[in-house]
Image (cartoon, helix red, strand yellow):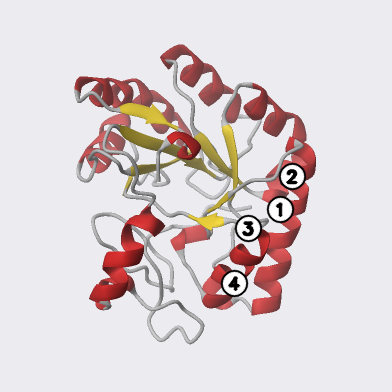
Amino acid sequence: MRYSSKTGMSAKLALRGGVGIVVAEGGYRSFPALSSLPPLRRSLWPYLLGTGSSTSVALTFDDGPDPKSTPLFIKELERLGVKATFFVLGEMAERYPYTLQELQNAGHEIALHGNWHRNHLFRSARSIRYDMERSYATVSEIASSAPIFFRPPYGVITRPTLATAAQLGLRTVLWGTWGRDWRKMTTPSSVMKDLKSNLEPGCTVLLHDSDCTSYPGSYRATLAALPELAEVCAQNNLRLVPLADHGF
């Protein structure tokens, strides 16, 4: 897989507070943009963004498992005494099953990010269904347990995305704040600056434990930012937790 700018997609995400909500201009299969439908936004916004307990912050990572970087995150999170949710790609799990098992053995939650990191907006319902079903089967077999959370690539949700997630019993979760840690010029300071712009009680944090779809080496800035993130949360009496312990 190759690096592709997440901010340069032709499918332009609706952004609110650094959050990719849904959808592209003129997308005929896309779910309605929440920011344009107030009643829907009020009822689904917290649900989709993973807004949970006011005493916690959910820590999530996308794009692994990656033997080059994921073990470093496992080690650092263990040092910090933190568990997280890892949204893994099926093709990465197929390639590196032992790294996925290492994540699970360390007590982290395994969730789905699809099989291939491809934008759902430009895919047929059949293609989306095949992608999600394949990743679900792969990850369930390797981890010996079925995942319960799903995050679509680029945060783009289409009707087939939601329909397939419902059929598989998956809950779709995006994020409340992100570190924008896929970029070429990412630094630990830039990751924390972006995170803190919307870091609040009950939010879900999006970071990446692999650079398989990001700029090469960008994961190092994310890794180096984790101690400060943990410190900021501790100073505000917030627990860093996986989604399963987030109370939402």
Q: Residue furthest top?
A: 79
Is the residue under label 1 in contact with that under label 2 (CB below 8 Å)?
yes
Up the image or down, 157 lies above or below 88; here it is below
Q: Residues within 10 Å of mark 2 (few under 14, many from 20)?
A: some
Name the disc covering residue 59, or none. none
Between 185 and 134, the residue placed more toward the observer is 134
Chain-order first, disc 2 or disc 4: 2
| Amino acid type at image mark 1 | Tyr
Chain-order first, disc 1 or disc 4: 1
Q: Would residue 204 appear left or right of 112 to someone viewing this image?
A: left
Q: Nearer the viewer, mark 3 or mark 4?
A: 3
| Amino acid type at image mark 2 | Ser
> Which residue shows up at 35% across the image and 46% down it?
180
| Amino acid type at image mark 4 | Ala
CA separation, marks 2 and 1?
A: 6 Å
SS category of the residue bearing label 2: helix
| Amino acid type at image mark 3 | Gly
Name the disc covering residue 169, or none. 3
Name the disc covering residue 136, or none. 1
Q: Nearer the viewer, mark 1 or mark 4?
A: 4
Q: Which residue is mark 4?
A: 163
CA separation, marks 2 and 4?
A: 19 Å
Q: Which residue is mark 2?
A: 140
Up the image or down, 224 lies above or below 113; here it is above
SS category of the residue bearing label 1: helix
